[in-house]
Image (spheres, grey):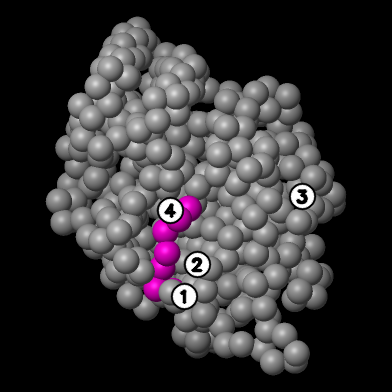
Amino acid sequence: MEKFVLKGTEITAPVPMAPTGTTGLGGFEVPLSKGGTLRSDASALNIGVLHLVPTLEVFPLLADPKSYEPNTIDLSDHNELEYWFTVLSEHLPDLVDKAVASEGGTDDAKRRGDAFARAFSAHLARLMEEPAAYGKLGLANLLELREECLREFQFVDAYRSIKLRENEASLAVLPDLLAELDSMNEEPRLLTLIEGVLAANIFDWGSRACVDLYHKGTIIEIYRMSRNKMQRPWRVDDFDLLKERMLGSGGKKPPPHKRALLFVDNSGADIVLGMLPLARELLRRGTEVVLVANSLPALNDVTAMELPDIVAEAAKHCDILRKAAEAGGLLVDAMVNTLDDSKENSTSVPLMVVENGCGSPCIDLRQVSPELAAAAKDADLIILEGMGRALHTNFNARFKRDALKLAMVKNQRLAEKLIQGKIYDCVCRYEAAS
């Protein structure tokens, strides 16, 4: 993996700056449809409303929706509650700095930043005294509350400029990564892809340990370090089960999945060097791929509105992604319009994007967008990636279809409690359909 990362080492670590075109409004304009019927243009937002539409649905592939509990961490334990409150409080100054910078660092932005910090701190203080003040409390609820507070004070996307810079850095080295993957046989390539997803998941502005890493090197340097340390067995390691389902054994190759839902996490290396190459491999096998992303910004998580542009840039270097993106309606202006290409593209499996209906680092699968619910009906593979969606929530969730949960644990306490491990341990959990 050394070769492809060298190109990106000169790109410096991101610094907060004012994004161009910042409106300062707390609303969120829903983009025009890109990606066929899986994108909604009808959703309307209100400031302070976390979920986009009032018609949120239960994810249809939950094995037992009635018993489903999204939260993994039990905050009824006072010590656990106090620990996570401390984590959120310690992260607050850095978050305020990013939020203010995202609005140009103006006096008005500083006033709103201070007001946000006071309001969120007041919420935490009240919940510390009365945990059930806003209903049943889980870690996912706390993280949602933080994002709601940001939007209440009209901070639309606190990490926008950072995400753009990390996407640029990662896209610069993507062609070399894809070339290296293409030089491998199928079995080592699958392992390298999973290792790549786990290594790239190190980038998380919500983790104090990861924020500290950002001050010590560029994102490509951090990714290279993470990638070089990626050795099996992982703390939770079901790769052999995944490999058997994907590649078969004893000379018998199983059929590919029909459609995969990829619940993606962070911008930058996470999506570009981790999940997109995995999506590409699934497309190569003949599996339709739906990238499932946030409807609203949360930390440095990629959003459904941002994904088409990222895919379009990646597709410039890859025919597999280009043809699939065209088939899925993500490339509105087709790069090549020849008759021959049109015939060829008609047989390509599509790559699509769907918004999940929320704006949080976690996801409660009892409340997803109608578009996601519709896309799920033809899916037979679910991939949940990242701490928020695969560990903080849904670690214990069971599904009617095959499920793969991939994450790097970036909190020591969570590692100890959840997998009896340590910080930066990895989870590759594969569960066959229930």
Q: Amino acid at mark 4?
A: Asn
The image quarter containing residue 268 is top right
Instruction: Tell me what residue is drawn at x 57 percent, y 88 percent.
Output: 255
Q: Residues within 10 Å of mark 4 (few under 14, many from 20)?
A: many
Which residue is denoted by mark 1 in the rendering?
433
Q: Earlier in the sequence, mark 3 or mark 4?
A: 3
Q: Earlier in the sequence, mark 2 or mark 4?
A: 4
The secondary structure type at the circle numbered 4 is loop
Q: Amino acid at mark 3?
A: Met
Give me the C-alpha separation between circle 2 and circle 4. 11 Å
Q: Amino acid at mark 2?
A: Ala
Residue furthest right as drawn: 2
Check if mark 1's residue and mark 2's residue have beta carbons within 8 Å. yes
The secondary structure type at the circle numbered 1 is loop
Check if mark 2's residue and mark 4's residue have beta carbons within 8 Å. no
Check if mark 3's residue and mark 1's residue have beta carbons within 8 Å. no
Which residue is denoted by mark 2 in the rendering?
403
As drawn, is 399 to the left or to the right of 25? right
Residue 231 in view of the camera? yes
Relative depth, front residue between 323 and 71: 71
Which residue is denoted by mark 3 in the rendering?
230
Q: Residues within 10 Å of mark 2 (few under 14, many from 20)?
A: many
The secondary structure type at the circle numbered 2 is strand
Give me the C-alpha separation between circle 1 and circle 2. 7 Å
Relative depth, front residue between 80 and 173: 80
Instruction: Tell me what residue is drawn at x 58 percent, y 60 percent.
Output: 429
Q: Amino acid at mark 1?
A: Ala
As drawn, is 126 to the left or to the right of 265? left
Q: Which mark is residue 394?
A: 4
The secondary structure type at the circle numbered 3 is loop
Instruction: Tell me what residue is drawn at x 63 percent, y 78 percent.
Output: 246
